[in-house]
Amino acid sequence: MNDILYYLVFFAVLTAAAWPLGGWVAHVFEAGSEGVLKPFRPIEHYLVRFTGARSGDEMDWKQWVGAVMILSVVKIVVVFLLLAFQDKIPFQKLINPQHFPGVPWELALNTAVSFVTNTNWQNYGGEATLSYFSQMGVLTVQNFLSAAVGIAVMAALFRGIARRETHALGNFWVDLVRINIYILLPLSIVGALVLVSQGVIQSFAPYQSFLTLSGAKEVLPFGPVASQEWIKNLGTNGGGFFNANAAHPFENPTAFTNFLQTFSILLLPTSFVFAFGRVVGDQRQSWAIYGVMVVLFTCFVVPTYLAETSPPVHAVAGIDWSAGNLEGKETRFGIAPSVLFSTATTATSCGATDATLDSFTPVGGMMPLLLMQVGEVVFGGVGSGMYSMIAMILLTVFVGGLMVGRTPEYLGKKIESFDMKMTVLTVTITPFLILCGTAIATLWHGVPSNMNNPVPHGFTEILYAFSSMANNNGSAFAGLNGNTAFWNIAGAITMFIGRYGVIVPILALAGNLAGKKLNAPSLGTLPTYNVTFAILLIFFVFLVAALNFIPSLALGPIAEFFL
């Protein structure tokens, strides 16, 4: 009963906070050339001019693609160089007191692509690899910028649906500045201060050595953790300062901070659902989408919780299962909060984790895996979740409308051939990357033999890795020796295509929708705000995931369950 109450209170708090925040987000998106808030307009205009743009300028979808790609490639190069030469940057005593060497080029490339694409997949232990400057001045900056890129692309799609007979989708550079100034930075400053008050460290002191009671010498790591911790969750980034991520007591010390961090993961994706209704002028759409997301989320939380709190079918004799499967979970959190955190982080593209997913039961581990594989539509990452959900809605409208003889329209816009081509490309690119990558990895010399677990659990680890990287999630199932040439290079390619292989067709879709006329609803229009459509949408989400991934799941967690 307490666990159910925890879940209900969590979503009550989340909804109460996301509703007004969604109104503010919509205001930021729709602000004109004058700016958003008068006291901050000089800063906003200066930063916009620094990018070479002007607040009144607007771009078509091709200009948006060019701007996104230019910024992303430049960031990858800069982050790569800063990581590779972190030991050559001035003021080493201050920014690199542990004297960590430069990051090897393969790992630096993987990390650069990972953080720029909002994936934050980590093939390294943060406290043993990166300097304070690399953590705070390089990676934390990308947590802001990569999140803002996804949100800006979502804003362009919102405008494409709301506007008519135009090619203007706003200005990418203006959106990038405004999203950081008015959304990400204020929330991150407040959140980081709250975490510091709860015991999350924020320090530039060198690591401290001490002797344990048994006489062993240990090293206690420090660092600017709180400033990275909140934005890693808020921006659904997930890259932890420490290798243990949110299971580390310096990152996540108490049950209360665990609740706050779970809340922060879902806050912005939920608020964007409510912002959508305000931008398109129909709040019924927001509530329908939110209802679908909550139902889908619950459909994954409940099996995970039951699997982790129940004895396994083939329980090992002599082990007390009365408290459930506590392996890999922090006792200061418990099973229910850990399950909620793990579900939230894989429903979004966050990747932070407060428990070891590798230690979950087969069914409990399959649920987070499948959550990523449904295409990041259950809340999803900041920006990417809503534009992926809208792509799924358009697919449902088109196919469902044809099935019942209704006109394929969404919010007054006819869904035509080009729209469906972009939608299908958006929906299928990540399954293609996941399945092809998994097949290549299982056949690649040295990859299977380098795993710590045999099949089918080892296969699940490979499948999970590519599911995480292709969906820009970043969480790991563990068990893989990821810091190898194969995983660093294959991962960088997968993360790059997984990010921009979706963004480009989404922007093309936004541009095409913006150019359409607005048609008045008729008797032949399929309503997209009622319970019937919500059920149909849920069916299509599960259908797409089942058609793509049931065979691979049968080789991994399902086979492990029966073994």
Image (tube, helix red, strand yellow):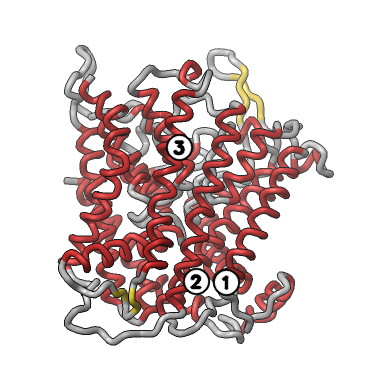
Asked if residue 52 shows in the view, the reply is yes
The amino acid type found where label 2 is placed reads Ala
Q: Where is residue 442 shown, x and y percent of the image?
A: 44, 25
Q: Could you say which is closer to the camera, residue 118 or residue 492?
A: 492
Which residue is the site of mark 1? 175
- Circle 1 packing at 10 Å, graded few (<14), some (14-19), many (20+), is many
Q: Where is residue 205 shown, x and y percent of the image?
A: 69, 39
Which label lies toward us, 1 or 3? 3
Question: Residue placed at 27% from the left, 30% from the top?
Answer: 554
Looking at the image, residue 536 sits to the left or right of residue 428; the answer is left
Give the mark nearer the N terminus: 1 vs 3: 1
Q: Marks 1 and 2: in contact by CB < 8 Å?
A: yes
CA distance for labels 2 and 1: 9 Å
Where 51 falls versus 299 (above or below)? below
Which residue is the site of mark 3? 466
State which quarter of the image contains the C terminus: top left
Disc number placed over residue 156 in the picture, else none: 2
Q: Marks 3 and 2: in contact by CB < 8 Å?
A: no
- The number of numbered badges drawn on the structure is 3
Looking at the image, residue 508 sits to the left or right of residue 293; the answer is right
- The local secondary structure at tag 1 comes to helix
The amino acid type found where label 3 is placed reads Phe
- Circle 3 packing at 10 Å, graded few (<14), some (14-19), many (20+), is many
Q: Where is residue 276 shown, x and y percent of the image?
A: 38, 72
CA distance for labels 2 and 3: 28 Å
Looking at the image, residue 45 sits to the left or right of residue 487; the answer is right
The amino acid type found where label 1 is placed reads Asp
Q: Marks 3 and 1: in contact by CB < 8 Å?
A: no
Q: Could you say which is closer to the camera, residue 120 or residue 494?
A: 494
Where 468 falls versus 153 (above or below)? above
